[in-house]
Amino acid sequence: MATVLTGCNAMNDAADNLARDRAKTVVNGVVDRQFPGVNAAPVTDCIIDAASANEILTIAGASVSGVTQSTVDQVLEIARRPEAVQCIAENSMTLFGG
């Protein structure tokens, strides 16, 4: 039974990582377009960390179906959350390549 659970956990982790990677690609593109000149990677990480699992799945889906204004709005909404704002502020030294 433990082997089966370990296998399920590994599959869930792989699926979570794939969704997060896809979502990061989408968020990175949104940040690049919305905030030209800003190093998108740290902002993207903060947004992904502040997103729920369902939001990550929705955003990841845009990597296949295409980024819409709804996707952009969702990313910007997550970026305005206190935990995302705090994370972005803490990483502000790296935002402009510094």
Image (cartoon, rainbow, N blue to C red):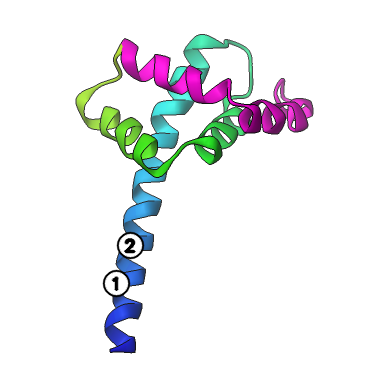
Question: Picture coordinates of residue 46 (x, y %)?
Answer: 59, 34
Whether residue 1 is situated above or below residue 22 in the rendered picture: below
Question: Picture coordinates of residue 55 (x, y %)?
Answer: 38, 34
Q: Are marks 2 and 1 in contact (CB under 8 Å)?
A: yes
Please rate how many residues cluster around mark 1, counting C-alpha atoms within 10 Å: few if below 14, some from 14 to 19, many from 20.
Answer: few
Q: Is residue 17 left or right of residue 62?
A: right
Asked where in the image residue 60 lies, by quadrant, the reply is top left
**Which residues make up the magenta segment?**
69-98
Residue 65 in sight: yes
Disc 1 residue type? Answer: Cys
Please, what secondary structure does the residue beneath circle 1 have? helix
Tell me how far mark 2 sits from mark 1, CA to CA. 6 Å
Q: Residue at x 35, y 70 (%)?
A: 9
Question: Picture coordinates of residue 40 (x, y %)?
Answer: 58, 25
Q: Residue at x 79, y 27 (%)?
A: 93
According to the picture, the residue beneath numbered tag 1 turns out to be 8
